[in-house]
Image (spheres, rainbow, N blue to C red):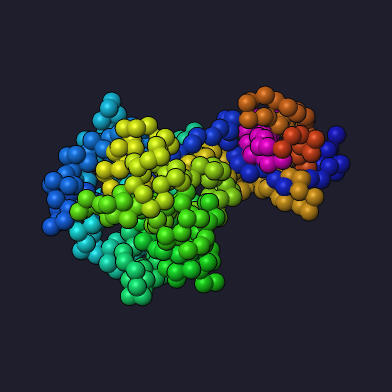
Amino acid sequence: MNLLMKIRFTLLLLFIVTTAWSQDTLTLLQYNLLNYGNYTSYCTANNNSHEQKDIYLRAIINYTKPDVFTVNELSQYEFYHDRILTEVLNSSGRNYYRRAELTNLAGSYLLNQLYYDSRKLVLYSQKVIQYNVRDVNLYTLYARNDGLARGDTIFINCIVAHLKAGSGNSNAAVRTTMTRNAMEWLRLNAKPGNFLFMGDFNIYTSDETAYQNLINPLPVNASFRFFDPINMPGAWNNNYDFRYWHTQSVSADGNGCQAGGGMDDRFDFILASASIMNGNQGVKYVTDSYYALGQDGRHYNKSITDAPANTSVPSNVLTALGNNSDHLPVMMKLSLSSSLPNALCDDAWKGQVQLVYVPDNFPVLRIRLNEADHYRLRIIGVTGMILYETSVYLSPGINEYTVPINGFSPGFYLVRLENSHFHGVTLKVVR
């Protein structure tokens, strides 16, 4: 009996996978390290020793266990990039962190870097997308997920920037140029997708043009618009209303290297593209996972170690945060699906199956065939349980089959369609 003539659905199957769908979570940590390995007249071996900073960093890393660790203000010398890898990340029994290559097209003494957990991620490529004042780096990673063996994976693009510091129009103008250059590079050289724009932005208000270039770009760059996960626009500088989001300065008095003044600026950010905020390309921002590590909202214009007691992190981590840098790190989590929102199938089926979205929002499977056959259709839950099974006869030409999931609970399901020779396609549908 031909069921194709009886049922017509709407939305269609999103993936071709042969195993149940699962999720992993990635933890991101973005941190300005404050002149790590860069010694000056004011940041010296006495008040900013890299050996002592290693001890502080180990406490922070042991506590946060990031999968992606992006940093600013790392020395121009490769020795220090390697030292963080060997003395901090790959310590305490770990051996799986890797790093990107050092770049310095701008000729700066303060560089960016990206470290990552090689058990979960692979560094696919890296580029410098602008080099006015300092490099802005684009690192493209892909996930070691269940679909990797089938050529099916998820890409995540981390743009790491350390924008020009300082108040006043001239410094703001340089920041504007840096973000404009980066956005133009993306428009001319990249495709929209899973992008993060992260780093020490040194901006004082969301009205600053450098920031607007990212969150509210000109129409020509609209495909690469970024979003603040906490959606907290405003004049952040010295504003009590934003005390939970301030990331600088951890010290009221400073120490000659650290800036003083207490917690009163929001300089450090992780912004995300629409794909990540919406989760429509395999990566999704985990709601309420964004925060400044060590920020309890009770130390406005104070040191984070001042009274009242800051219990937002363990005491050893608080000590490390108070001494390692004048910035707090920012963190967020991403949920990662085990496969891309693309279909995978047996070679004979490539290009023959399509997901169609109709006004009623039910999935419709559109199948183009050269010859008729009997097919078995199954709907499978993400745990692997078969929830629905039937036999259908498909004719040569284009067939459309409505997937009967309208009575199912909202969520993800797998649909497997097989011919009499056990060749077929598995797709993911959303109810």
- Residue at the image position 34 percent from the left and 69 percent from the top: 167
Image coordinates for residue 16, horizontal then vertical, percent: 60, 39
Image coordinates for residue 155, horizontal then vertical, percent: 46, 47
* Marker count (numbered): 0
Magenta residues (range): 411-431
Question: From the image, which quarter does the N terminus lie in?
Answer: top right
In the rendered image, the vertical position of residue 116 relative to residue 76, given as above or below: above
- Residue at the image position 17 percent from the left and 53 percent from the top: 43
Q: In front here: 109 or 313?
A: 313
Question: From the image, which quarter does the C terminus lie in?
Answer: top right
Does residue 78 belong to the magenta stretch?
A: no
Does residue 423 belong to the magenta stretch?
A: yes
Q: In front here: 257 or 161?
A: 257
Image coordinates for residue 406, horizontal then vertical, percent: 79, 39
Image coordinates for residue 425, horizontal then vertical, percent: 63, 37
Q: In front here: 345 or 307?
A: 307
In the rendered image, the vertical position of residue 404 relative to residue 279, given as above or below: above
- Residue at the image position 68 percent from the left and 30 percent from the top: 380
Q: Is residue 102 visible?
A: no
The answer to which image quadrant residue 293 occupies is: top left
- Residue at the image position 17 percent from the left and 47 percent from the top: 47
Q: Is residue 129 visible?
A: yes
- Tell me if 129 is positioned left or right of 192 in this view: left
**What secondary structure characterizes most of the magenta part?**
strand
